[in-house]
Amino acid sequence: MNTISRVIVSLVYYNSLVRDTLEYTLKKDKFEVNFYDYKRNGIVNEIKLQTPLKVFLDQNGEKGEELRKKLETFGNDFYSDTSTVIKKTADGLRVDHAQSVRIFESVIPLHEELNSIIKLHVNYARQNNQLDERIVTLTNADERFYRAVALMTLNGELDRQFEEFNKVMRESKGEPTPQSNFIQNDLNTLVKCLATVRQNATAKDHLYTDALDAVFNSVEMMNGKRELPAGKNFPDVFNDANIKIRDFVQDSEDAWKKIYQPLLQELVEDNKKAREAAQNGANATEEKKAA
C-alpha cells in the first residue's frame, strides 16, 4: 500500500467511527461496551499518535488545527468520561436518547467534512497516477454505506419524534404548546440533516434513490405537502420507507465490509512495520553512539 493509500484508508477508518456514532440514536436494549471502547480509542488517539490522520492535520496549518479542534470536541462530547450523552456504567452503556438530535447535528457535518478531505486525496492520487483501484472501490462502498446508515437512523428518529408530536398535539386539542414547539424544532433539525445527506451524496443506484425518495415523501406527508397513500397511515408510510432502507443497508454494508476489512488490516500491518523500522533505526543509532 503506497503512502497516499495509507492516508485515505486512515481517513476512512476515522470517518467510519464518526458514522458509527449514529448507532447511539437507535433504541436498543443493550449497546456493546467493547464496540464503544473501540470507537473511543480510535476517535481519541488517532489525532494524538503519529498516524496518517495526525500527519495530515499537522501539515495543513490553520485548517488542520481547526479540524483537529472539531475532532477533539467530538471526542469530548461523545467519548469522554464527561459526556452527558453516552456514559459507561457498571452494567454497560447508558445513552441519553433525549440528546439524539445533538448526535445527528455533530456527526453529519463532521462526516461530510472528512469525506471532502478523502475526495481531495483520491483526486490527488488519480492526478499523480498513484490511485490504487481498491481505494476507488473502498470510497464508493463507504459512500453508499454511510448514506444507508444516515437514512436508517434519521428516518427512525423522525418516526419517533413525529409520533410524539402528534401525541402532544392530541393532548392539547391541537393547540401549540412549549413541548410541541420543542419537538417541532427537533423535527426541523432532522429534516435539515436529511437535506445535507442528500445534497452531498454521490450514490445514484436505485437502492439508494428508492430509500431516499421514500424518506422525503414521508417528510412531505408530515408537512402536509403530499397526501397519504390511499388506505395508509403514517406508521405504514414509515414502515414502507424502512423496508427500502433495510434493503439498501444490507446491500451497502456487505459491499463495504468486503473491501474495508482487508484494507484496514493491511494498513495496521504497514503501520506496525513502519514502527518496527523506526525502532530498529533508533536502536542502531544508539549502538553507534555507544561504540
Image (cartoon, grey):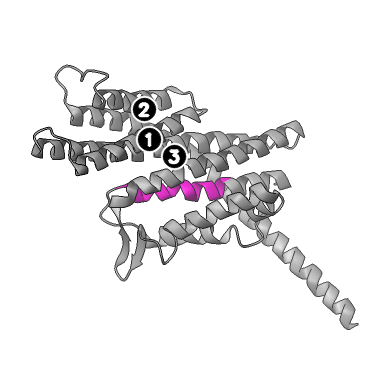
Horizontal side of residue 8 vs 204, given as left or right: right
Instruction: Check disc 1 and give the amino acid type.
Output: Leu
Residue, disc 1: 151
Instruction: Check disc 3 and give the amino acid type.
Output: Glu
Q: Is residue 47 above or below residue 204?
A: below
At horizontal 8% and vertical 34% (from top left) the residue drawn is 173
Horizontal side of residue 251 vs 66, given as left or right: left
**Tag 2 secondary structure:** helix
Considering every residue shown, the one lying at the far right of the view is 291
For residue 211, the mark is 2
In space, the residues marked 3 and 2 are separated at their CA atoms by 15 Å
The image position of residue 201, as x and y in percent, is 49, 29
Mark 3 and 2 residues: CB-CB less than 8 Å, in contact?
A: no
Horizontal side of residue 83 vs 267, given as left or right: left
Q: Which residues are magenta?
A: 12-26
In space, the residues marked 3 and 1 are separated at their CA atoms by 13 Å
Residue count near mark 2 (Cα–Cα under 10 Å), binned few <14, some 14–19, many ≥20: many
At horizontal 36% and vertical 59% (from top left) the residue drawn is 86
Instruction: Locate residue 150: give its quadrant.
Output: top left
At horizontal 33% and vertical 48% (from top left) the residue drawn is 100
Mark 2 and 1 residues: CB-CB less than 8 Å, in contact?
A: yes
For residue 253, the mark is 3
Q: Is residue 91 above or below residue 186?
A: below
Residue count near mark 1 (Cα–Cα under 10 Å), binned few <14, some 14–19, many ≥20: many
**Tag 1 secondary structure:** helix
Camera-side mark, 3 or 2: 2
Residue count near mark 3 (Cα–Cα under 10 Å), binned few <14, some 14–19, many ≥20: some
Q: Is residue 262 above or below residue 236?
A: below
